[in-house]
Amino acid sequence: MGPYRIEARLGAGGMGQVFLGRSRSGRAVAVKVVHPELAADADFRRRFAREIALARTVSGFFTAGVVDADPEGRPPWLATAYVPGLSLEEAVAEHGPWHERDVLVLGAGLAEALESIHAVGVVHRDLKPSNVLLAADGPRVIDFGVSVAVEGVRLTRTGMAVGTPGFISPEQLTGAVVGPASDVFCLGAVLAFTATGTGPFGGGSWQGLWYRTVHEEPELAALPPRLRDLVGRCLDKRPEARPTATALLDELAGNVTDGGTLADLYIDSRWLPAPVAQVVRTLLITPV
């Protein structure tokens, strides 16, 4: 695909399939190939090109940045930095919920990622456990900068917003203005999931999740008090009442760094729960 040799299939999502690719110099990348139905849509191609241009300007450490793309390709594709780690969704499913401090350390990295994404005018719109990869040196947020392109097609064809039920803001569901505060709402839902193993609006049908997200308060009783307060503020129904990513980063860093820096925490997978850290270390030494 372009200059990259495809070596393996990594997975699939709403936009298309994801493959492990290799550059001519041997660098591993994640190559996302657009689904044929989307690729055939001229409006999608225009949005995709615009969002890729914005996404290229994101340079935060806790993001898997865009390194190459061809929005006019047949099919269109983009390549991002390859992260040798498992997803947060997989980690919680396989090893259970995390302790409070581990969740707070994760939250600090994700808040810094959102800060860098928002700084260049990008809104992720679909931050969820499967879009958070756990690497030895910190979390990585993936799939930012392409949701708007998919959203335009989905709204036209189905009337549904982009996002994952249970991890999507009320304003995305009601058609209100979507901005950085929507990502903060999603972050709150991700942290609640990490601490409990379930989303803050329960499970079941997407219709039920939709209703509870818009009209009911989240279920946070199982969270420790400090985390409950932070997540509750992120999940405020009113976008203007939610903290910014920068404010969250300042608060979380103050809670977990003990006078040091965030960089001190993300060393050799020690920031992760022990069972998850062991898996990540194994992935690091497995050739790709």
Image: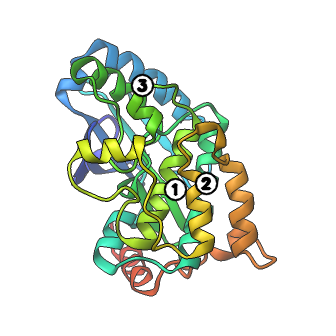
Q: Quadrant of the N terminus?
A: top left
SS under mark 2: helix
Q: Nearer the viewer, mark 1 or mark 2?
A: 2
**Quick one: label 3, few (<14), some, or many (20+) residues within 10 Å?**
few
Instruction: Write the residue at 49% across / 63% down.
Output: 191
The kind of residue tagged 1 is Gly
Q: Is residue 175 left or right of residue 263?
A: left
Are dots 3 and 2 in contact, CB under 8 Å?
no
SS for callout 3? loop
Residue 233, numbered circle: 2
Q: Are marks 1 and 2 in contact (CB under 8 Å)?
A: yes
- In this view, 139 is above or below 165: below
Q: CA distance from mark 1 to mark 3?
A: 20 Å
Q: Nearer the viewer, residue 214 or 26?
A: 214
Which residue does the image show at 33% across and 42% down from the upper left? 211
Which of the two discs, 1 and 3, labels the residue nearer the N terminus? 3
Q: Residue at x 73, y 62 (%)?
A: 251
Across and down, in percent, residue 131 comes to 40, 53
What residue does disc 1 label? 188
Q: Which mark is residue 105?
A: none
Q: Is residue 126 above or below residue 274?
A: above
Circle 3 sits on which residue?
A: 175
State which quadrant residue 175 falls in: top left
Give the distance between the C-alpha atoms of the residues marked 3 and 2, in whole angstroms: 22 Å
